[in-house]
Image (spheres, helix red, strand yellow):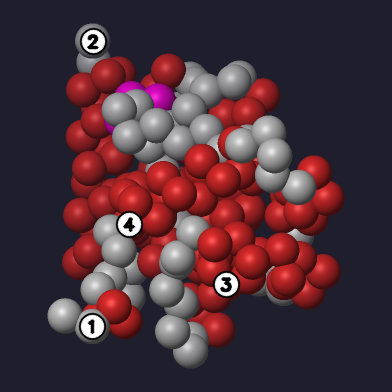
Amino acid sequence: MPPEAEAPSLASQLGRLAAALARPSFSTGDHAALRRMDPQRPDRATVPLQRLLDDCKVPLGDSTGQFHRWALIVHCLALARGRHDMTAPTGKTLDDLNVSEARLNQLLSADRDVLFDLLPRLARRLAAQNAAIDWRPLARIVLADDEDRADKARLEIARSYARAHDT
């Protein structure tokens, strides 16, 4: 199989991005630019963003929409200081952070444009509480090209939240 046909898994892509952002040797200036950028218009952070995506081998294709979706994910990871933990179920972590059911429903029912507002807030909250989360389900929602895939990720988060909230 040619290298361009091998699609790295979302888990490995997020893992590489989070590890790079958490590394003490990651450029302070680049990290600040990624935290301050507007993912829908990453003008001033385009070079550090593209460099990070290239270094972490995140395939973008030619779609500017895909670039902006990955910009949102990187922005959130930068705000959360690279805190990504695949063993910290997203819904449970949201419950641990005392995210209300109403806020969770707002997040899960948000369209992509609203996610560009809500996810950075969540990332800041994670950073403020020094918490890590599994970003995969949230990234699946952001990156999904069809609603079925996004809905599966939403359901995964809701189940995890409900289980944690009921205990």
Give the residue at the far left of this rendering: 1
Q: Quadrant of the N terminus?
A: bottom left
- Does the magenta-highlighted stretch encompass residue 9? no
Q: Residues within 10 Å of mark 3 (few under 14, many from 20)?
A: many
Name the residue that disc number 3 marks: 68
Q: Which mark is residue 10?
A: 4
Q: Which mark is residue 2?
A: 1
Q: Secondary structure at mark 1?
A: loop
- Residue 44, given in percent of the width and then of the height, sits at 82, 69
For badge 1, the amino acid type reads Pro
Above or below, 126 against 144 in this view is above
For badge 2, the amino acid type reads Thr
- Estimate the spatial distance between the alpha carbons at disc 3 and disc 2, rounded to whole Å: 38 Å
Please report the residue visible at 23 percent of the width from the left and 10 percent of the height from the top. Answer: 167
Q: Would residue 109 be seen by someone viewing this image from the given angle? A: no
Q: Nearer the viewer, mark 1 or mark 4?
A: 1
- Estimate the spatial distance between the alpha carbons at disc 3 and disc 4, rounded to whole Å: 16 Å
For badge 4, the amino acid type reads Leu
Residues tagged 1 and 4 counted as in contact (Cβ below 8 A):
no
Residues tagged 1 and 2 counted as in contact (Cβ below 8 A):
no
- Does the magenta-highlighted stretch encompass residue 92? yes
Q: Along the horizontal axis of the image, is 104 left or right of 77?
A: left
Q: Nearer the viewer, mark 1 or mark 2?
A: 1
Quadrant location of residue 165? top left
Give the residue at the far bottom of this rendering: 62
Magenta span covers which residues? 89-93
Name the residue that disc number 2 marks: 167
Q: Secondary structure at mark 3?
A: helix
